[in-house]
Image: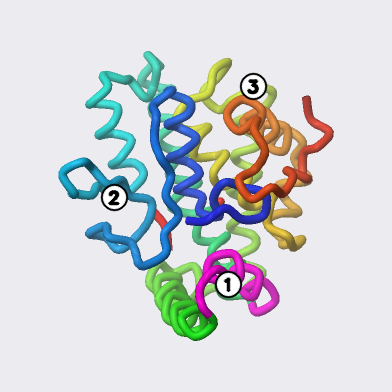
Amino acid sequence: MRPAWGLPSSSPFCLKLETWLRMEQIPYTAIALTKPPRSHTGKVPYILRADGSTVADSNVIISGIAEEFSIDPAHGASAEERARTHLILRTLEESLYFAAVWERWQQTEYWPTTREAIFGHLPPILRQLLAMTIRRKMLASLQGQGIARHDSARIAAIGQADLMALSSLLGERPYFHGDKPGLADASAYGTLANLLAFPHSTPLKRVVEQHDNLVDFCGRMKNAFWSEAASDGAPFRWFDSTPGHQE
């Protein structure tokens, strides 16, 4: 996905993967798509290997790279900490993600901003056609997953509960993984940074802003792994005072 809103990617999963690669100091080249993904899932992120094959799904990619480079993504964490990371990922990627997608893609007041960020670089006719097609698929996926079957108040409550739980789990720790960041932190940053950077005061963004530890966490991750200027030149406005269908 392309840079947007002062972030390297408007996709939580692409930003998660790139952050993890930086965390593990694994070199990579990010390529912004100009046509539909070549992955077998039809989704992003995916990696293109030298033999022309692709590997899709951020967790599958990370697992494969970790094995290839003999990396322990949990960095020696206990079984309890590994289980904690597993549950954090599930909260972020199987619950909160869909509430955020519903805000961006379903809500008429936010959809134009989403459309411009993802499709704005395309020629007008292609932009209109592709945006309409992909949006229809995204809305169908929200119905299939189930979150779009609720009313807006219930969806906001689901997202709020997830964010409050994440804030409680983080507490006063610098990272979800503890003193040093890990996979859970890469995923959390991909999601939370996208919520904060979105140019509208959405219900989910307001909840994040109400939890100082989540905002400070994003600032800490940005300073640690994205200290250079954002890819599109926009500032990370939402934490200036502190020391991104996907899968």
Q: How is the image coloured?
A: rainbow
The circle drawn on residue 56 is 2
Label 3 crowd bin: few (<14), some (14–19), many (20+), radius 10 Å: few
The residue lying at 61 percent from left, 25 percent from top is: 224
Q: Nearer the viewer, residue 196 or 211?
A: 196
Q: Mark 2 and mark 1: span between their CA atoms? A: 23 Å
- Judged from this view, the residue extending furthest toward the right is 241
Q: Amino acid at mark 2?
A: Ala
Helix, strand or loop status at disc 1: helix
Place of residue 65 in the rendered image (x, y in percent of width and height, measured from the top left)? 28, 31
Which residues are the magenta region?
A: 108-123
**Picture residue at 67% right of the left edge, 38% below the top:** 229
CA separation in Å, label 1 and label 3: 36 Å
Quadrant for residue 20, please give it.
Answer: top left
Q: Which residue is mark 3?
A: 173
Q: Is residue 116 left or right of residue 26?
A: right
Mark 1 vs 3, N-terminal side = 1
Label whose residue precedes the other's in the sequence (2 or 3): 2
Q: Earlier in the sequence, mark 2 or mark 1?
A: 2
Left or right of 37? Residue 53 is left
Q: Quadrant of residue 173?
A: top right
User: Residue 117 magenta-drawn?
Assistant: yes
Considering depth in this image, is 140 or 25 the residue closer to the camera?
25
Classify 190 as above or below 144: above
Residue visible at 53% across and 63% down in the picture:
101
